[in-house]
Image (cartoon, rainbow, N blue to C red):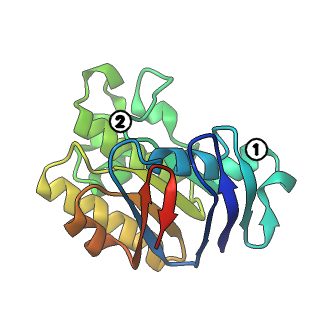
Amino acid sequence: MLSISDLRTRILKPVSLDLDAGACVAVRGPSGSGKSTLLRAIADLDPNAGEVRLDGRSRDAMPAPDWRRRVIYVAAEPGWWADTAAEHFPSGADAAALAEAAGLQKDIVSRPIAALSTGERQRLALIRALARKPRVLLLDEPTAALDGEARDRMEGLVAAFRRDGGAALWVAHDPDQAERVADRTLHLDQGDARA
């Protein structure tokens, strides 16, 4: 599904990784080790070199908007460009039903983004990504601001995404969470990766 060969940035030393359909790789390491940089490079949001392929097709052969619909980066602190969450969902998506599946009240999607808690915004960012039906999720600490119950729901939504053939890279500081959500772990330290 996703194949990465010698991906590198100013900070990141060459990384190679294969991610099969249904798989999840936890990305761990100390702060500043290059975890977010790796995800942003795969998403083609930051300058990088190397090769990234999805289903055999090179990222460079695909227009950036097409790539970013298939490979979605969910930031630790997600950005919002409209006043309400509903405006951030693709047309036809049932944002209220998705919010309910994430343990949120249905009407949360019509509330102003500025009035939502960090945890609510974090859950909405994940379901916003899932609503776009990507092939790969790049999750940068997607549950950092959540309590245990909300964290478990989000882990469950990603598990369902994987059962449907999606794949994920998941930055996790908590080793217990990494063990729960991932098939294997990639460790980063000062931009150097090891399995």
**121 over 174 or under it: above or below:** above
User: Which of these two is toward me, 104 or 152?
Assistant: 152
Look at mark 2 in the image and give the residue it sits on.
109
Q: Residues within 10 Å of mark 2 (few under 14, many from 20)?
A: many
Residue 59: x, y in percent? 77, 56
User: Which of these two is toward me, 144 or 119?
Assistant: 144
Query: How much space separates mark 2 and mark 1, taking CA atoms?
Result: 28 Å
Q: Residues within 10 Å of mark 1 (few under 14, many from 20)?
A: few
Say which amino acid is labelled 1.
Answer: Ala
Where is the N terminus found, in terms of image quarters?
bottom right
Residue 155: x, y in percent? 29, 64
User: Can you see residue 77?
Assistant: yes
User: Can you see residue 94?
Assistant: no
**Proximity of marks 2 and 1: CB atoms separated by less than 8 Å:** no
Residue 29: x, y in percent? 35, 56
Say which amino acid is labelled 2.
Answer: Val
Q: Residue at x 19, y 47 (%)?
A: 146
Q: Residue at x 66, y 51 (%)?
A: 8
User: Which of these two is toward me, 173 or 152?
Assistant: 173
* Quadrant housing residue 170: bottom left
Secondary structure under the numbered disc 1 in the rendered image: helix
Q: Is residue 2 left or right of residue 186?
A: right
**Front of the two marks 2 and 1:** 1
* Quadrant housing residue 182: bottom left
Q: Is residue 11 left or right of residue 56?
A: left
Secondary structure under the numbered disc 2 in the rendered image: helix
Look at mark 1 in the image and give the residue it sits on.
64
Question: Residue 85 — which label?
Answer: none
